[in-house]
Image (cartoon, rainbow, N blue to C red):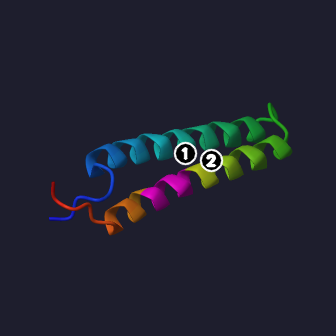
Amino acid sequence: MKRGFVNPRVVTKIAFWTTSACILIAVVACLLAIWDFAKTDVLWRTVSTCAVIGGGMVAFYILNGLFDRPEE
């Protein structure tokens, strides 16, 4: 049974909530830019930051599943 290096349930929960928060923040930034409450420069920086953080969490989730932890 594959277990990953870190407990897969914990990694799944952290990756889900972090990615969900990034999506929510990016959507709010887009809405603020659409309604001219924020400049487009702020929009692109926010969306880019969220994409990098969300992508990093997804990559960590995938890599954790690739590495097997020996049975103890």
Question: In the image, what residue occupies the spot 55% across and 57% down?
Answer: 55
**Label 1 vs 2, first from the N-terminus:** 1
23 with respect to 42 (left or right)? left
Residue 10 point in image, percent of width and height: 31, 43
Element carrying mark 2: helix
Residue 68, image quadrant:
bottom left
10 with respect to 53 (left or right)? left
Front: mark 1 or 2: 2
Location of mark 2 (residue): 50
Above or below for 9 versus 63: above
Quarter placement of the N terminus? bottom left
- Which residues are drawn in magenta? 54-60
Residue 35 point in image, percent of width and height: 76, 35
Element carrying mark 1: helix
Identity, as a three-letter code, of the amino acid under mark 1:
Ile
Location of mark 1 (residue): 23
Above or below for 66 versus 69: below
